[in-house]
Amino acid sequence: MVSTSLLGTPPPWPLGLVTAVLAGVALWSVTARLRLRPESRAASTAVYACCALLTELTTPDGVDGRATLLLAAGGMFAVAGTRRGAFGALVCTAAVALAPVVGVGVLVLLGVMALRKDLLIRFPAPLRRIAGVTAFAAAAAVVVLLARPQDGPAVPLGVLVLLGVCVLLIGGVAWARLPWLRPPVAAVVALAACQFVPGPDLDAVLPAAAGLAVLAAVLTEEHHVLLARPVLVGAVMVGVVATALLVPAVPLPAATPPHHVAEVVPAAAPEPPRVTAVSIAIPRMELSGSLDVLGVADDGELLAPDDPARAGWYAGGVVPGDVGPAIVGGHVDSRRGPGVFFALRSLRPDDVVEITRSDGRVARFSVTSVAQVAKEQFPTAAVYGPTPRPELRLITCGGRFDRGARSYTDNVVVEAVAT
């Protein structure tokens, strides 16, 4: 998952997924401390796992579960007793450092606790109200600081709908029937709301899902007659998994391209050939569609297609099927969802790519390598240099999203040879 990190660069998605799983294990411990029944703990962990799966399937770089792992560990220490409360607070602080959006939920939690007299109980009521309002204002300030202007939310619509429904159902019932649970409900609602704000949007998905899992476990235990029947729990799990697997990956067009897809290309561009590339098909990705024509910017950088749902062929280079490297670029995502090359990293050697030309020929290529490289070290000579046979390069963005530069730090480059 794309995240703002003050302690280092977010890890590759496999490491993020492992830490997300460990966060689920920590959630199991938290629910044990709450003295919930084993079936309730299993249900909460299953809900969390399904939400993590959905997040991993619908974001370009998978999940970064480090902040959620620390947050779950902090909760485990917090419910273990006052002696470990200070250590739990330090762990939660580390979680905020890794993903500042977590601070929104923590501040809202403290604010509601102050207003409800769960916190600062020895202070007069006016001071508690001031502390609560101050915490809410600080949470709003964090959202403003993390917000990215001129971009829409990056969370796919399916994730917004699913987690929104869960927040309404689980949070609404918990708020109405379990008044003592209102502070964490407010924190989860605040994190879920952050998904609609560009910047903290993607970072808020996983901690919101983890919070919902714990709330669901508490609700299940308190109202087990209604919620803990095995058939109902099983039906809910199947529904969540099915939703996660069936979230459509069809991107909505963005008004302007959010970033470029490649580094500097040779400045000298030959005259556009009479034969052009008109469409692309990649069976492994279940991709088939027309190709736009790509040009270069004033600084020689290859431009991305205007439509994130379409790939583009660099018309200043080689026609696919002719001797030399033909270049095709596309978006990995947009502010509305996945782009045409969202799954480009899933290609494997010997996968087939077909390019249909305007002269009726179909150039067929076989993938030889898939690599992710830093944009500062983009291998321009290797990608654009002459080759003794027809070859193809597919290029998109990858790595971490740099919010300051509003672009990804890496490129994903797929090389293929004619068959």
Image (cartoon, grey):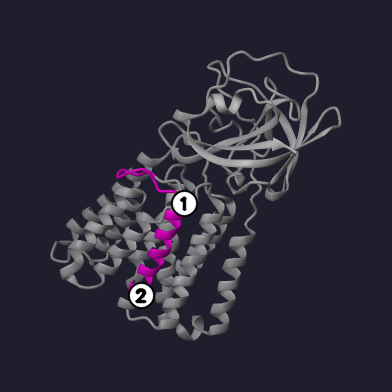
Q: In terms of depth relative to the viewer, which is nearer, 382 or 319? A: 382
Q: What residue sits 64% from the left and 50% below the top?
A: 249
Identify the secondary structure beneath mark 2. Answer: helix
**The C terminus lies in quadrant:** top right
Identify the secondary structure beneath mark 1. Answer: helix
Instruction: Please tell me the numbered disc located at residue 235.
Output: none
Residue 21: say if magenta: yes
Instruction: Please tell me the numbered disc located at residue 13.
Output: 1
Query: From the viewer's perspective, is 190 left or right of 355?
Result: left
The image shows residue 328 at horizontal and vertical percentages of: 66, 32
Q: Give the range drawn in magenta.
A: 4-29
Q: Is residue 36 visible?
A: yes
Q: In terms of depth relative to the viewer, which is nearer, 416 or 178? A: 416
Query: From the viewer's perspective, is 182 left or right of 283?
Result: left
Vertical comparison of 103 with 237: above or below:
above
Circle nearer the N terminus (2, 1): 1
Residue denoted by label 2? 31
The image shows residue 73 at horizontal and vertical percentages of: 30, 64
Q: In terms of depth relative to the viewer, which is nearer, 8 or 80? A: 8
Count neighbours of disc 2 (C-alpha within 10 A) and say few if under 14, some if 14 to 19, many if 20 or more.
many
Q: Give the amino acid type for the residue marked by disc 1 in the picture.
A: Trp
Q: What residue sits 59% from the left and 31% below the top?
A: 256
Q: Give the amino acid type for the residue marked by disc 2 in the picture.
A: Thr
Query: From the viewer's perspective, is 93 left or right of 384?
Result: left
Could you give the CA–CA distance between mark 2 and mark 1, rounded to whole angstroms?
Answer: 27 Å
